[in-house]
Image (cartoon, helix red, strand yellow):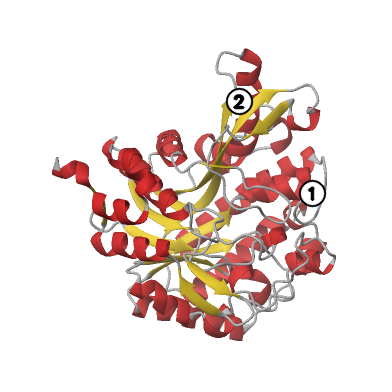
Amino acid sequence: MAERQALIFPDGFLWGAATASHQYEGGNTNNQWYTWERAGHIKSGESCGRACDWWTNAERDFDAAQRMGLNALRLSLEWSRIEPSPGQWDDRALARYRQMLAVLRARGIEPLVTLHHFTHPIWFEKRGAFLAPDSIPLFTRYTAKVVEELDGLCDFWCTFNEPNVYAIRGYQIGGSPPGHVGDLRGAVRAVANMARAHAAAYCEIHRLQPGARVGWAQHYNIFDPARAWSPLDRLVAGIQDSGFNEAFSHAILRGRAPFPFNLLSGDLRDVRGTCDYVGINCYARDLVAFDLRRPAEVFGRRFPAPGAPQGDVGADSLYGEIYPQSILRVAQRVRAFGKPIYVLENGVADASDRLRPWVIARALRSVRDALDQGIDMRGYFHWSLVDNFEWDNGWSMRFGLLALDEKTQERSPRPSAEFYTEIAHANALTAEMVKRYAPTASDQVFG
């Protein structure tokens, strides 16, 4: 009975929060997302501005993370700060990143550093970004520079955040730079070249740091057939799943893209096996129904399950069905890599904190279930530490454990921050915690 009243996590389990440079630092005016903002593509009409003011004072949030008992923090480097012009390095930017990592380590917080979290220099974008012939050596050169400069402060690297999202939103949907619509060839080529860049960076990091841990963060969305009995629903759900979830990860697992994307991807044999861990970002689920009116979506209409929990409305849409139990399903899927698995993002847009405690509790039930099945789960990073500038939705979606007034830069902990603090300090989730912070999750976690 006692075991049913607490989910105990392994010694050394990482309790973290995830962040990203453009969304947190402020003042990033030399990357392609700044150009995108200036062109009027932020749906809320807002600007990133100071963001969370990390370039000036990240330390205040590092202190908050320490008080919460977090032992890890995921952050990204802003390539456009480090290499503002081709081959020109900014020593002050590198010094600031060294300072940030040293401060984290002094607080007992291990940094997990992402090299590319959706942003890169304007000059790189103008060359064609990851469609450019020299994109792989350019990314490798940047990687080598930062690893050499930050050696001794970080040996835990994430090459790319959500390459599938980057490619689909940038080349297929048009919701992110470069804003192409219906460019399937561009999306597939971008994913393939990012896979090659990942593999080259993996080898370069290990050349410089033989003991480093190197992986990437893959966004996994769940695509379930709306009618399990329908062969057409199952078919289109499977195609959407393969196209979104597998193009990059399959290259690392198998050394090739899944059919039919392999027809456009070229030779990816050198990508196979280039990871020391698998990072998974898990948020949502779509039900998929066959629909002849949706040719651009492979004739699959996506929608949330009736009555399913959904986060706050963004600038123009709902985020979708919040589905933290996807962590177990994704972990079962990626155990085929035979590598440790980290949940590198999981969370919900929820200004009033009505769902976030439930999301945390339900997510950790999934992590514990995966551990019980013998899956090597090593950590959970909640998205996000502080309310952040949410890309094209601006400030209209609030993901933070800490609420932020972006005008005054004042922070205030939400109840979910107190909940997560108790979990991290205890290295456990207890029934009493769930009863106080997430009573609606009690039966799902301990029932």
**Mark sitting earlier along the chain (1/2):** 1
Mark linked to residue 174: 1
Q: Position of residue 28 (x, y in %)?
A: 69, 75
Can you say which quadrant of the picture contains the N terminus? top left
Q: Position of residue 154 (x, y in %)?
A: 43, 69
Callout 1 secondary element: loop
Judged left or right of residue 39, residue 193 is left
Can you say which quadrant of the picture contains the C terminus? top left
Answer yes or no: is residue 375 visible. no
For disc 2, the marked residue is: 238
Residue at 58% x, 62% y is 398
Picture quadrant where residue 31 is located:
bottom right
Q: Position of residue 200 (x, y in %)?
A: 57, 54
Relative height, residue 160 to residue 78 (above, below): above
Mark linked to residue 391: none
| CA distance for labels 1 and 2 | 23 Å
Residue at 64% x, 80% y is 407
Answer yes or no: is residue 206 visible. yes
Picture quadrant where residue 132 is located:
bottom right
Judged left or right of residue 198, residue 327 is left
For badge 1, the amino acid type reads Gly
Residue at 35% x, 80% y is 106
Relative height, residue 236 to residue 209 (above, below): above
Residue at 75% x, 50% y is 170
Relative height, residue 155 to residue 311 (above, below): below
Q: Position of residue 155 (x, y in %)?
A: 41, 65
Picture quadrant where residue 121 is located:
bottom right
For badge 2, the amino acid type reads Gly
